[in-house]
Image (tube, rainbow, N blue to C red):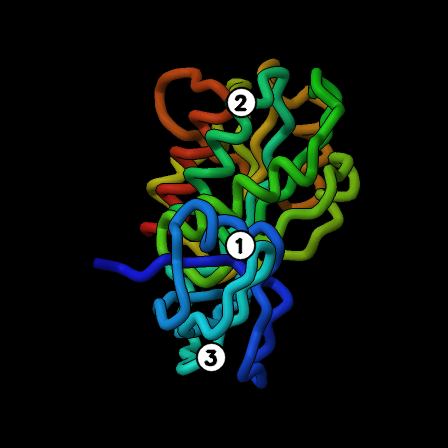
Amino acid sequence: MSLAYFYEPDITPTSTLHVLSEESSKHAIQVLRMRAGTALQLTDGKGHLYTAGIQEVSKKSCTVKITGLQQQPRAVNRKVRMAVSLLKNAGRYEWFLEKATEMGVQQIIPLLSERTERQHFRFDRMQSILVSAMLQSQQAWLPEMPEPLSFEKVLAIQATQKLVAHCEMDGHKQPLNKITLHDDVLLLIGPEGDFSTNEITQALQQSFAPVSLGNTRLRTETAAVVAAALLVNA
């Protein structure tokens, strides 16, 4: 049986004793009914996996003693970054965040494009989705996720290989599953109404190569998950 697994962003590799966060303490004590001597695992989301044992328990806090530390490799060797437009239905975006995290995408950039209908972004809520997915999939790396960025700012991001998926007819588009991927990939995926013609032109001018994700028109979140699977498994 696997040990209970907690996210502790403030723990450091030099720690010998660590007081769990209020949220982790509450879950350990009130939900899991853990007691002194119980073993557990912690991660800081930066690749460190700690083995620990509960040393002291009170009503609101839990102190653990660190007994081991390992540096965990990333699930994916390639650096995969995805800029995906926010969606009108926030639940669909949360679903994408969960699946992308499980697959090992390294950076997820909430994108604001011309046709993005929803501008509001509950950062804390979305961050909690990433943390839950990381823990559920037993990983020690939390994807990076900034606050939403404009299309222009995303175009300025440097990457070895830059790709844009869109639905317009384009004889230069290549299927994503047919191209040779580099070790650092940034892929753009637009909103429900797709990128505008102007945005596509701007992306091409900034050396983004156009790609397709299949023969059918996909919802944004479906396209993003399909793309993530192709990028991390190639």
Q: Nearer the viewer, mark 3 or mark 2?
A: 3
Image position of 201 with respect to 24: above or below: above
Choose the circle earlier in sequence order: 3 or 1. 1
Q: Quadrant of residue 120?
A: top right
Mark toward the viewer: 1 or 2: 1
x, y (%) of residue 208? 61, 43
Amino acid on which the number 1 mark rests in the picture: Ser
Q: Viewed as shown, does residue 1 lie left or right of 91?
A: left
Q: Which residue is mark 3?
A: 66
55 horizontally vs 200: left or right: left
Disc 1 and disc 2: Cα gap in Å? Answer: 25 Å
Measuring 59% from the left and 37% from the top, which residue is drawn there? 188
Residue 24's label in the rendered image is: 1
Residue 70 badge: none
Residue nearer the viewer, 119 or 171: 119
> Label 3 amino acid?
Ile
Residue, disc 2 = 91
Viewer-proximal residue, 67 or 75? 67
- Above-or-below relation of 71 to 24: below
Mark 3 or 2, nearer chain start: 3
Where disc 1 sits, the SS reads: helix
Which residue, as the protein is rendered here, is positioned at the far left?
A: 1
Vertical comparison of 33 with 177: above or below: below
| Residue type (three-letter) at the residue carrying disc 2 | Gly
Q: Residue at x 48, y 69 (%)?
A: 47
Q: Pointer 3: residues within 10 angstroms few (<14), some, or many (20+)?
A: many
Secondary structure, mark 3, is strand
Mark 1 or mark 2, which has the lower sequence index?
1
Which of these two is toward me, 60 or 210?
60
